[in-house]
Image (spheres, helix red, strand yellow):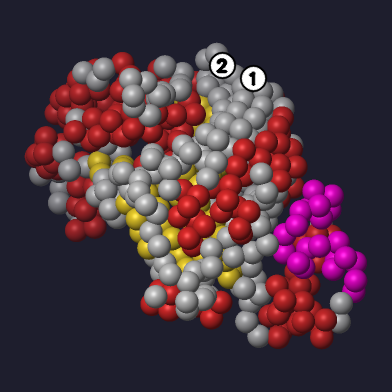
Amino acid sequence: MLEQARLILQKCGGLPLAISTIGGFVSTKPKTANEWRKMSDGISIELEMNPELRTIKTILMRSYDGLPYHLKSAFLYLSIFQEDQRIRWGRLAGRWTAEGYSRDMHGMTAIELCRRYFDELLDRSMILPGEGTKQYSQKINSCQLHDMIHEICISKAREENLVFTLEEGCCLSDTQGAIRHLVIGSNWKRDKDVLESKLDLSYVRSLTVFGEWRSFFISDNMRFLRVLDLEDTLELKDHHLDDIGQFRHLKYLSLRGCRNILCLPDSLRNLRHLEMLDIRGTRIYELPTTITNLLKLQHLHADDRLDRLRVRGEDAIVDKYQRYIGRISTCERCSVLLYKGHVFLRPQVLDAGLNRYDIFNLYRFQERSLDGIILPKGIGKLKTLHALGAVDVSGRNGNATIKEFGELTQLRKLKVGGLSCRNINKLWSAIAGHNQLQSLSVKMGNPHLISTTTPLLLPIPIPNPLLMLFDLLRSICCCM
């Protein structure tokens, strides 16, 4: 019974009125685990049918009705996310902006306006703060909807025909008119016929996928798609993204947590309205030159620690090589082989029929960890970038990349890794005039490659306000 009591309390979401009312109602029921389990499972139905509990929903509905128009729209958008899901602030702000709920106005950036909306919803208890805060600003970096508010959010979004979720037990007759935001739930049975013949996808503006990916999820009919959120989607492969360039209105693309993604497709060059690209948690470590065509890109997020090949021992190295060969043989070779990715994926390697000795030598040449993504030449053309990183500058384009940072004068947040005392002063010179920079993270590379004589100078003047985080992976004392 303690477990059932905990679940009921969780569904009350910390609302004193809900706890008091439902507690009184439960006290009239037989004190058995089975009875309390039925109460927990059917609490949303009880809110509708039971007059003792209907008061809670009435009061919560008044809280919603009291929201100003702009907050109602932002709040209903949260019905896209799953029950009890922790919603990251960055994910939500990026999507709100892409959908037009927020924009630059009155000297305030779109992201700053999103933060105001977020804080207002927190103050009104329409959302709950998630665990954790940003390290330096101490601002809440995630939120959740308590169950009762989530029920109201879904109900009102359905009334407005704002969001349609394909999930177990969903009723297709509920769709009336065009679908604006389509969600594919993790428990949906993945019925191709339903998606292609029974739903009008011509006005879909956002597609969000939870659970396992299927190639038919993306339709040519989604010509107005603005948001494609595939965060943590399972079984998504490189070739599934080959035709992504057809969605020319796309502003937000998240592949975060998609571990089977090794490279970005050539068709990415067509996404000229793209504003946010998140590839954290993928296996992409180098961006193609086509990224420099995305002149409206504002946020480019990548991991700050990338191991090109995570294997140990001779057998594991050979196994890794053979799995790459097998992967290439079962997918469309053209888009992958043009990519300058893992050395194991290059055409001359794939066709060489290497022996065990050759594989070891090749691995030793390739093996090293990166402190961010490798950028192509021409990144300085992306004048609208606000957030960039993490970027590794230890390789062949490193100095050219640092120089091009000087052209990115709109940067608010920059993360750079793979630096040495030979080039860190070039970084200071490049960003010295960036007076909008608010956050800078610097990671030094291998101390054995760092000069012990080059003085470490800070940029003068220091951009204001600027929060400098020197995350020195190895002792910076060797530079002094």
Label drawn at residue 64? none
- Left or right, 133 with respect to 197, comes to left
Residue type at tag 1: Ser
Residue 202 disc label:
1
| Residue at screen point 67% across, 50% down | 376
Q: Quadrant of the C terminus?
A: bottom left
Residue visible at 54% across and 68% down? 422
Q: Is residue 58 left or right of residue 187?
A: left
* Disc assigned to residue 178: 2
Q: Can you name the residue that lies furthest to the top here?
A: 177
- The image position of residue 264, as x and y in percent, is 68, 47
Q: Which residues are magenta?
A: 332-353
SS of the residue under disc 1? loop
Quadrant for residue 74, please give it.
Answer: top left
Give residue 73's position: percent from left, percent from top: 37, 21
Contact, CB < 8 Å: mark 2 with mark 1? yes
SS of the residue at dot 2?
loop
Q: Residue at x 20, y 57 (%)?
A: 1
State the image coordinates of residue 343 (x, y, percent, origin top left): 76, 67
Asked whether residue 389 is in view, the answer is yes
Q: Is residue 25 left or right of residue 228?
A: left
Magenta highlight on residue 447: no
Asked if 181 appears above or below 287 in the picture, the reply is above
Marks 2 and 1 sit apart, C-alpha to C-alpha, by 7 Å
The foreground one among 123 and 309 is 309
Relative to 357, residue 285 above or below: above
